[in-house]
Image (spheres, rainbow, N blue to C red):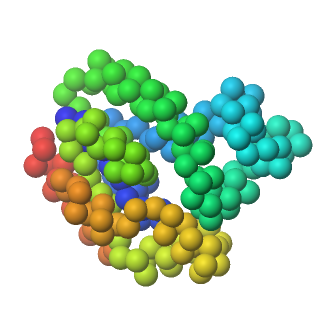
Amino acid sequence: MIVGLTGGIASGKSTVMQILSELGAATIDADKISKELTEKDSPVLDEICQAFGHEYFTEEGCLNRAKLGEKVFSDKQAKQKLEAILHPKINERLKQEISKFQAENQNKLVVVEIALLFETGQEKQYDESWVIWVDYHTQLKRLKERNGLTTQQARDRINAQMSLDKKKQLAHRVIDNSGTFEETELQVKQIYSKLL
């Protein structure tokens, strides 16, 4: 089975992926692929530079992720422009990684973490879609603490994504990460053992 796992910013996707990995699932992180695609000297950077300009790059030619992040989280058109550049390339790499994992681990659960699973219509490519859900106030608090953002900056980033309540309605399974790590871990273990 191949699962598309999603959530919102600071909802705890990495935590759940870590638990799944420790349980024996094969895990793939779309965000990690995105970062690899935008490393120094990557051909993708030329496209980003043409679309956004040199001001989003450091003197060394590296992408200024913080500055570009600020732009795309406050400007819907800029966000769509960046996604149009990155998403087809990320999707291609994901397909390659999934094929590789299936060839190597035929009996393993494969879980792909994709922040914009529903927004990009990719949920149709997976056997199941799972959502890591957290209440809005907990999400806001965690994001502010984790990224050192103001309340407004954190709100802008959360509001730039589909709401977790909407994602919850679209998902096959929901993991509530509003409580303790132990409570989340128990939910993941129960789902995993059911699937096995």
- Residue 137 in the image, given as x and y percentages of width and height: 43, 81
Residue name at image x 28 percent, y 23 percent: 102
| Picture quadrant where residue 13 is located | bottom left
Horizontal arrangement in the rendering, residue 104 relative to residue 191 (left or right)? right
Residue name at image x 83 percent, y 43 percent: 54
Q: Is residue 102 visible?
A: yes
Question: Compared with residue 90, is residue 123 higher up or lower down, i.e. above or below?
Answer: below
Using the image as rendered, state which of residue 146 and residue 94 is in the foreground. Answer: 94
Horizontal arrangement in the rendering, residue 106 relative to residue 34 (left or right)? left
Using the image as rendered, state which of residue 189 and residue 123 is in the foreground. Answer: 123
Question: Compared with residue 36, is residue 5 higher up or lower down, i.e. above or below?
Answer: below
Q: Which residue lies furthest to the top in this view?
A: 103
Look at the image and tell me in which quarter the C terminus lies.
Answer: top left
- Residue 104 in the image, given as x and y percentages of width and height: 31, 20
- Residue 169 in the image, given as x and y percentages of width and height: 22, 63
| Picture quadrant where residue 187 is located | bottom left
Question: Compared with residue 65, is residue 49 higher up or lower down, i.e. above or below?
Answer: above
Q: Can residue 18 be seen in this view?
A: no
- Residue 10 in the image, given as x and y percentages of width and height: 47, 65
Residue name at image x 38 percent, y 27 percent: 95
Residue name at image x 45 percent, y 27 percent: 92
Q: Residue furthest right?
A: 59
Look at the image and tell me in which quarter the N terminus lies.
Answer: top left
Horizontal arrangement in the rendering, residue 173 relative to residue 28 (left or right)? left
Using the image as rendered, state which of residue 40 and residue 44 is in the foreground. Answer: 44
| Picture quadrant where residue 35 is located | top right
Q: Which residue lies furthest to the front in this view?
A: 77
